[in-house]
Amino acid sequence: MKLSVIVVNNNAGTLLRQALNSLIYACKNIDYELIIVDDASTDHSMELLQDQYPDITLICNKASQGTGRANNQAIDRASGEYILLVSADTICGKDSLQKACAFMDEHPDTGGLSVRMLSPQGRFLPESIHGLDKTWATFLRLIGFARHLSKTRLYDRNRKDWVEEFQISEIDILSSDFMLLRRSALNEAGLFDERFLMYGHNIDLSYRIRLAGFKNYYFPKTYIINYERQQIPKFSWSYIKYFYGAMIIFAVKYLIRLPQIKVDGIPALFQHSYEVKG
C-alpha cells in the first residue's frame, strides 16, 4: 500500500467531515487507507462517521490518550509506505497528496515533508516553513537548543536568504498539521514520544528523524487549508499545563543527562540516553 492517512479527532465535528471528504477525494488515484483515532470525543461525531464512511478504520479511545499515543495507535495499524498525519481541521488540496508522494518517491533521503498552509482567508501561515510558533522558538533559543536547528528561522525571520513561501527547502521541524512520513524513517527514528500529550510531539520526532540520517522538507508546490482550531482555551490551566509541560519534557530529554533510577512498580519519567557503570 502506498499511503496510510491518519487523523486524530477530538470533538472536531463538522470540520472533521470536511477534512475526510477532501482527503478521500485527494486519494482517488492513490492506493491508500484511512485511519481515524477518536480520542474520547463527546460530540457524537464518531457515530455519524461510522454511517457515512464505512471503509475507514476507526479506533475509539474511551479515555483521552494524548496526541502522541493516539498517533502511535494508528501507526501500529498502518501498512502504507508513507504515513500522513493530518489534523482534523484541515482541508486538503485535490492534488496535494499525489504531488507530495511523488516528491518523496523522487527524494529517497526524505524522512518527512510538510506543505504550504493557508488560512481559510488565503493568508500564508509561516508555521508551514519552520513548524514552530513564536513561543516555542523563543524557548528553544533560551535553552540553547537552537544551535541544532540551523535550517529553522529562529532568529532574524526577515533575512532574504531564508526559505520563501514558494521555495522547496530542507527544514528542521515538520508542521504537526501535515506530516508526511516515510515508514522506513519511522522504523529508524522510532514513533512519537508519548509523554508529549498535546504539544511538542512533532518537534521531538522531526529532530529524531534528522538524527537518524534523513532530511525533512518544506514542499510548497501544493497546499492545505488549516482552520487553526484551538482545542483548549489558550489562557486555561489545561493549556498552560500541556503547552509548557511539553517544553519541560523537551528540555529534560535533550539537555539534562541523569542516570536512570529504577523503582519497582514506578515507570521512569525521563529515560536516560547513556549507561552508568559502577
Image: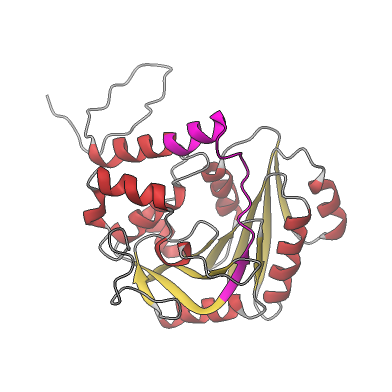
Residue 137 visible in the snapshot: yes
User: Could you tell me which residue is drawn at 26 percent across and 44 percent down?
Assistant: 142
Tell me if residue 147 is in the magenta stretch.
Answer: no
Is residue 29 toward the left or the right of residue 115 in the image? right
Q: Position of residue 46 (x, y in %)?
A: 79, 47
- Tell me where residue 157 sits by quadrant: bottom left
Residue at the top extreme of this rendering: 264
User: Could you tell me which residue is drawn at 32 percent across and 21 percent down?
Assistant: 262
Q: Position of residue 138 (x, y in %)?
A: 33, 48
Q: Which residues are magenta?
A: 223-244
Above or below 74: residue 182? below
- Tell me where residue 165 sits by quadrant: bottom left
Q: Position of residue 42 (x, y in %)?
A: 77, 37
Tell me if residue 232 is in the magenta stretch.
Answer: yes
Above or below 137: residue 225? below
- Quadrant of the image containing the N terminus: bottom right
- Quadrant of the image containing the C terminus: top left
User: Could you tell me which residue is drawn at 60 percent across and 64 percent down?
Assistant: 4
